[in-house]
């Protein structure tokens, strides 16, 4: 039987007086590659922040790896890459290697030094994202897509079991988006890393994912990608709030 990594049970959330999430329930199991879809402002980033323990739900419960979120100790099992990661300009004084190594502090604690195997871990993480040749380059000299791969490596270096990516391809051109998703699919398939990917890009990612969740304040659909493909256009338009085009 598959292990449930995230179990979201009836979660609601509001900022001040605005309800953002209402009665959200779904599970993410080991090995899933889940695309989290929804229009702008539908609560996707808020839900991720709740999963990451950065926000507390108003009601409901979240279990991470079977443990209530509040007492979950292995935060290093969950890697996170935000859409704002690729914001370094060419003057930023850090090498790719240093950026990736900084991901190890999550595992070993802020005031301890990384062990002797740190370099090997950094190299392995960079290799996994196809960026090992860039190890000594300055992060600011890389393209947006390359920087985003480095941030995946930074998340990978602490051996996460789950990667959460919030629109990681914003600003990356179409051709590089394809190879970026291929890299994620390889990590999912070969290293068994479970993926939650927030995207507006369902057509491009569609043949790499296993599951889809559609969010607009509440969950309108959660299930296998093949079942998502069979959803009627009317149902899709209704939860999106306007007409959307589904391309196969
Ligand atoms: N810190 C905050 N304080 C108050 N309201 C907020 C805050 N952050 C987000 N919101 C509001 O909560 C709602 C959901 O925002 P959220 O960022 O979770 O949506 P999203 O689906 O990730 O959107 P996008 O696709 O545009 O990134 C929006 O109406 C937003 O304006």
Image (tube, rainbow, N blue to C red):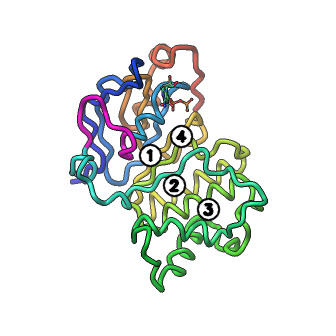
On screen, residue 106 versus residue 98, left or right, reads left
Residue underneath mark 1: 196
Point out the frontmost of discs 3 and 4: 3
In this view, 182 is above or below 137: above
Residue underneath mark 2: 185
Marks 1/2: CA–CA distance: 11 Å
Q: Residues within 10 Å of mark 4 (few under 14, many from 20)?
A: some
Marks 4/2: CA–CA distance: 11 Å
Residue underneath mark 4: 206
Marks 1/3: CA–CA distance: 18 Å
Quarter placement of the C terminus = top right
Q: Residue at 21% across / 51% down in the picture? A: 67
Residue underneath mark 3: 150
Residue 112 position within the rendered picture, expressed as x and y whole percent measured from the top left:
42, 75
In this view, 44 is above or below 134: above
Along the line of sight, the residue nearer the viewer: 187 or 62: 62
Report if the CB atoms under discs 1 and 3 are less than 8 Å apart.
no
Q: Earlier in the sequence, mark 3 or mark 4?
A: 3
Q: Earlier in the sequence, mark 3 or mark 2?
A: 3
Marks 3/4: CA–CA distance: 24 Å
Secondary structure of residue under mark 1 = strand
Q: Residue at 59% across / 46% down in the picture? A: 168
Marks 3/2: CA–CA distance: 16 Å
């Amino acid at each position: 039987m598959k292990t449930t990594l995230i179990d979201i049970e009836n979660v609601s959330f509001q900022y001040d007086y605005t309800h953002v999430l209402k009665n959200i329930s779904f599970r993410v199991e080991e090995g899933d590659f889940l695309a989290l879809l929804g229009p702008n402002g539908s609560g996707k980033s808020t839900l991720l922040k709740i999963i990451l323990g950065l926000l507390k739900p108003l009601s409901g419960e979240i279990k991470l790896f079977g443990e209530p979120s509040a007492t979950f100790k292995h935060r290093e099992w969950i890697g996170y890459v935000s859409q704002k990661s690729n914001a370094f300009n060419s003057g930023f004084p850090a090498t790719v290697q240093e950026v990736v190594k900084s991901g190890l502090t999550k595992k070993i604690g802020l005031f301890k030094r990384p062990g002797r195997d740190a370099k090997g871990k950094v190299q392995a993480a960079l290799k996994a994202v196809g960026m090992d040749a860039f190890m000594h380059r300055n992060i600011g000299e890389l393209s947006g897509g390359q920087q985003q791969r480095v941030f995946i490596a930074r998340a990978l270096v602490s051996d996460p079991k789950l990667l959460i990516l919030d629109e990681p391809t914003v600003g990356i051109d179409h051709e590089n988006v394809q190879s970026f998703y291929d890299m994620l699919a390889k990590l999912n398939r070969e290293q068994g890393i479970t993926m939650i990917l927030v995207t507006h890009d369902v057509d491009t990612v569609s043949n790499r994912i296993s599951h889809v969740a559609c969010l607009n304040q509440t969950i309108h659909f959660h299930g296998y990608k093949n079942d998502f493909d069979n959803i009627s256009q009317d149902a899709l338009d209704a939860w999106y709030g306007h007409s959307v085009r589904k391309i196969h």
